[in-house]
Image (cartoon, helix red, strand yellow):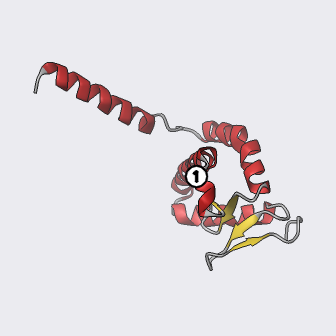
Amino acid sequence: MSSRSVAVFLSLLALVAVPCVVRAASVEELQKRFKERYPKLLQAKTDGKIGETYKGYVEAVKEEYLKDEAVKKLINDENADRKELYELMAKEEGTTVEKVAERNAVRNFKKARKGQFLKGRDDKWEQKKEDEEK
């Protein structure tokens, strides 16, 4: 392999590896990203394109909504940051990521607005019928 080929390979490898390293290192950074993304997330939920799941993550309510790259990116970014936050919290609390995610799911179900979609353990989407927290 020529030195030029090695240089090109290493450059491409660096481009692929850099996004993996850029993830947040602190809760504050994650909270900032959640806050910045919230208006778009809320709009997608209000439009019925994205819903909360019992696992503590968001998903497209219909597969066809994933054809919209903005919706797909919103879901991926939100879930990546949630996973990172859950990992930080689980480590701090001495519990599992799954338990932290499920606690967050309960909170998000309660906070969901009337008409927003929620996916229960039966893997079926249902629209929330009332606005108040229970």
Residue at 76%, 43% (x, y): give it: 39
Q: Report which quarter residue 130 is drawn in.
A: bottom right
Vertical relation: 107 (above or below) 28: below
13 relative to 132 in the view: left or right: left
Under circle 1, the secondary element is: helix
Q: Position of residue 98 (x, y in %)?
A: 54, 65
Residue at 61%, 75% (x, y): give it: 123
Amino acid marked by disc 1: Lys
Q: Is residue 58 visible?
A: no
Residue at 73%, 51% (x, y): give it: 44
Quadrant containing the C terminus is bottom right
Quick one: 86 or 125, which is closer to the camera? 125
Q: Report which quarter residue 52 is drawn in.
A: bottom right
**In the orientation shown, which residue stands out farthest toward the left?**
1
Q: Which residue is mark 1?
A: 67
**In the orientation shown, which residue stands out farthest toward the bottom?**
122
